């Protein structure tokens, strides 16, 4: 019998079973996708197995074919007790190690709304501004998935270490991802954070584009309250409604109330 299948069992005698099998197999033996017993036990939340394997010398930095180590898999699955154990055992080692998509454990936890794991990782020194290969932050992934509690936790806990308006490689902010994913509650929370932390250009063109093109009139009011730069407003509206280019280019000279009416009209036209 191989060691890694035993690591995934949730029986009370798992430690004893591991000890018997370990006499004939390495603690870092892997299956056909390079998962070690520690990776498997961390994924399924088998605390006893994880503890036994660490004590037996298992390598917490070993990765599977997708570049995921034990900490990543535990974070992705929301196994907070396992994450705490791994962090206690190896400190910040591997806390910002990325998988084959450029995700670090923080990305995985935020994407799936594991707010308790996010808190543990932040407390251990994980970067809230880590970027995957597409330039997306954990905040962007949480916003796109509509994980409101996680977005709030990142904004509150990582204040000062996180730029809310950071853009991906495609020019998308976390707010743009939230709007694209129809996570309007997340978008409103981000709009408030943008207004407080980035007064010069808080919203971003992609967020405004998605808001207008998808007809979110109520959210549009919130975004405009965040005071995006006038040139950004004009560029977005001209690009979305070229037939109204002359009118919209003069938007910067309009009184705020008249400008808001014009934008709402454009949203309604986009949905007609």
Image (tube, grey):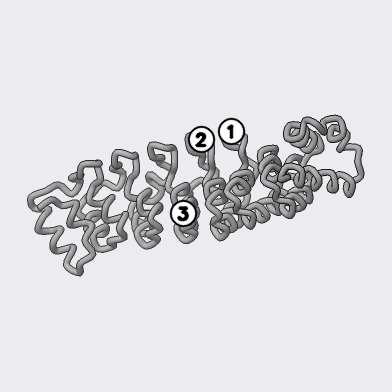
Where residue 263 appears, as percent x and y from the top left, is 80, 44
Task: Point out which mark residue 136 bears.
Answer: none
Where on the picture, by quarter, is residue 117?
bottom left
Vertical placement of residue 151 versus 48, above or below: above
Q: Secondary structure at mark 3?
A: loop
What distance separates the C-alpha of mark 2 from that of mark 3? 18 Å
Disc 1 target residue: 170
Binning the other alpha carbons within 10 Å of mark 2 as few (below 14), some (14 to 19) or many (20 upward) gives: few
Direction bottom: furthest residue: 12
Between discs 2 and 3, the one toward the N terminus: 3
Where on the picture, by quarter, is residue 96?
top left
Binning the other alpha carbons within 10 Å of mark 1 as few (below 14), some (14 to 19) or many (20 upward) gives: few
What distance separates the C-alpha of mark 3 from that of mark 1? 22 Å
Where residue 48 appears, as percent x and y from the top left, is 25, 63
Direction from residue 75 to residue 52 in the image, left or right: left
Vertical placement of residue 213 versus 46, above or below: above
Where residue 261 appears, as percent x and y from the top left, is 85, 48
Position of the C terminus, as image quadrant, is top right
Q: Secondary structure at mark 1?
A: loop
Direction from residue 85 to residue 214 in the image, left or right: right
Disc 2 target residue: 134
In this view, the residue in front, 5 or 270, is 270
Direction from residue 88 to residue 238 in the image, left or right: right
Disc 3 target residue: 112
Direction front: furthest residue: 272
Between discs 2 and 1, the one toward the N terminus: 2
């Amino acid at each position: 019998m191989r060691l890694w299948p035993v690591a995934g069992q949730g029986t009370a005698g798992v430690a004893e079973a591991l000890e018997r099998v370990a006499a004939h197999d390495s603690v870092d033996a892997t299956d056909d996708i390079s998962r070690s017993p520690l990776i498997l036990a961390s994924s399924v939340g088998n605390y006893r197995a994880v503890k036994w394997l660490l004590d037996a010398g298992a390598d917490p930095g070993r990765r599977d074919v997708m570049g995921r180590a034990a900490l990543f898999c535990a974070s992705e699955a929301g196994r907070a007790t396992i994450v705490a154990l791994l962090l206690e055992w190896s400190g910040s080692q591997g806390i910002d190690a990325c998988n084959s998509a450029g995700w670090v454990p923080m990305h995985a936890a935020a994407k799936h709304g594991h707010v308790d794991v996010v808190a543990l990782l932040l407390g251990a020194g994980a970067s809230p501004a880590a970027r995957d290969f597409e330039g997306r932050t954990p905040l962007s992934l949480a916003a796109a998935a509509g994980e409101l509690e996680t977005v709030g936790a990142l904004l509150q806990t990582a204040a000062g270490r996180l730029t809310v308006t950071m853009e991906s490689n495609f020019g998308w902010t976390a707010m743009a991802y939230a709007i694209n994913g129809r996570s309007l509650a997340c978008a409103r929370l981000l709009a408030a954070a943008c207004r407080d932390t980035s007064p010069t250009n808080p919203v971003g063109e992609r967020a405004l584009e998605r808001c207008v093109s998808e007809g979110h009139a109520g959210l549009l009011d919130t975004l405009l309250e965040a005071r995006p730069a006038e040139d950004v407003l004009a560029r977005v509206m001209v690009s979305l409604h070229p037939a109204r280019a002359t009118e919209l280019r003069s938007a910067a000279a309009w009184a705020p109330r008249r400008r808001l009416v014009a934008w709402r009209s454009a949203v309604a036209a986009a949905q007609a």
